[in-house]
Image (tube, grey):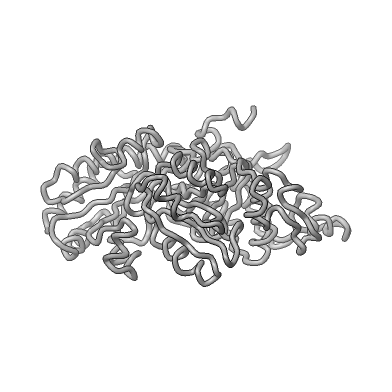
Amino acid sequence: MEKKSLKPATLCVQAGWEPKNGDPRVLPIIQSTTFKYDNTEEMADLFDLKKDGYFYTRLQNPTNDAVAQKIAALEGGVGAVLTSSGQAANFYAVFNICEAGDHIVTSNEIYGGTYNLFGVTLKKLGIDCTFVSQEASEEEISAAFRPNTKALFGETISNPGCKVLDIEKFARIAHKHGVPLIVDNTFPTPINCRPFEWGADIVTHSTTKYMDGHACQVGGCVVDSGNFDWDAHADKFPGLTTPDESYHGIIYSQRFGKMAYCTKLVAQLMRDLGSIPAPQNSFLLNLGLETLHLRVPRHCENAQRVAEYLQSDPRVAWVHYSGLPGDESYELAKKYLPNGSCGVIAFGLKGNRQTAIQFMDSLRLIAIVTHVADARTCVLHPASHTHRQMSDEQLREAGVAPDLIRLSVGIEDCSDILADIRQALDKI
C-alpha cells in the first residue's frame, strides 16, 4: 500500500522501517560510527553527494533515518532529520536558511528556551529577531518584517501558555513576504495537528515530549514539507540556490529539488555542528512513536477532565486550556485541533507565588520535574524554574504569567490525578 493512503495509527506502527526478506522485524540499532566500502570510488561518491548511503553516523545512520522517515510520514513531509534535542531542531531549522546579517520574526508565545535561543544566542551569531504578538493583526505582524527577514516562527500550542496559533494567518503573512513558516508542533503532535495542511512549510519537534512519551531520551526533529519554492525567492536564500563550494559547487535546490532543505541541513550543519541523536536514543523514540496514536487521546481525555475540575474550583484564579468553552483559543482549537489539543494545562491560583509553590510541594502523585508531555503527570512553575532568568515584564511579554502553573496531565487513572490535585488544594 502507498504510505499516503495509510492512516496515522498505521504509520505510527509501520512507517520508517520496512524489513526485506530475512531482515529483523524490529528496527535494529546500528550502533556503529562507520560503514565499510570495497573501494575508494564508492566512498568518494558519497562524500560528493552523488549517491545515497552511509559512511559516518554524524551525517546519517540507518536507525536514525528510519525514525526520521516515520515522523516525516506522520507529518506529511518529504523528508526529516533527527537532532539531539528539540532546541537543536529549532536552531537548525532557522540556521539552515539564515546567516549573519539576517533577521527572523517569531511569535512571543514560545517556549522559554526557544525565546532565549532566538533573542539572545542567535544575536551572537549576527541573526536578529523580532518578537510579535500572535494575536496581532496581519498588518501589525507584517510591519515587523524587514528586507533581510528569512523566516516566521510559531508554536502550534504555546509552551507554557497553551495558546493556539492561527497557522493559516501566519502562513499568509510569511508567504506574502517570500519566507517559509516554521511551526513547532511538539504539543499536539501530528496525531492532533498537521501544520503542513494549513500552509506551514517546515515543522519542528522536541521528540523528548509526547513522541517519546516516557521521558527516557532527549531528541528533536526537523521536517520539510517540500512545498516552499526556494528558487522563486533565490535572492533571499543563497545557501540553497547558489553553489556550495564545500561540495564542488552543488546547488541544492537544483540537484535535490524538494529534498534541498533537508539535504543541506545534513550535508552542512550536521557535518559541521554534529548535534545528532545516538542510534540507541532513536530506537527508544521509535518505541514511543508506536503507541503515540493510543497515548495522545488519553492525555487529552484526562486533561479535559482536569481542566474542567480546575475551572470549577473557587481556589483557582484562571485556567488556559483550549478545550474549555470560553477559552481564548477555543475557536482556533475547533479549527486546527478538532480531535483534542494535548495534555498540558496552564492555570493560576488565587494568592501569590508562594501559594503556587505550596500547592506544588503538597502534591504526592504528581511530580515536580523539568519536563512535560510524558506518560506521568508532572508539574512546573515556569517563573521559578524554566523561565527564572526572565523578569516579570519579560514573562508577560512571553505570555507567561508569574503565577502560571504548567500541569502536564499523564495517562494514569484520572480519578487518582484529580484526588491528588484536590488534596494539594486543601493544603493552601
In the rendered image, residue 93, in percent from the top left (x then y), is placed at 56, 55
**With 192 as the anchor, is 240 left or right in this view?**
right
In the rendered image, residue 165, in percent from the top left (x then y), is placed at 39, 44
**With 8 as the anchor, is 399 left or right in this view?**
left
In the rendered image, residue 356, in percent from the top left (x then y), is placed at 19, 60
Q: Quadrant of the N terminus?
A: top right
- What residue is shown at x 41% (from left), y 36% (from top)? 336
Q: Quadrant of the C terminus?
A: bottom left
**With 254 as the anchor, is 158 left or right in this view?**
left
Query: Does residue 337 show up?
Result: yes
Closer to us: 253 or 138 = 138
Query: Does residue 219 show up?
Result: no
- What residue is shown at x 65% (from left), y 58% (from top)? 31
Closer to us: 8 or 198 = 198
In the rendered image, residue 334, in percent from the top left (x then y), is placed at 35, 33
The image quarter in which residue 382 lies: bottom left
The image quarter in which residue 360 lies: bottom left
Q: How many marks?
A: 0
Residue 395, placed above or below residue 286? below
- What residue is shown at x 71% (from left), y 48% (from top)? 253
The image quarter in which residue 34 lies: bottom right
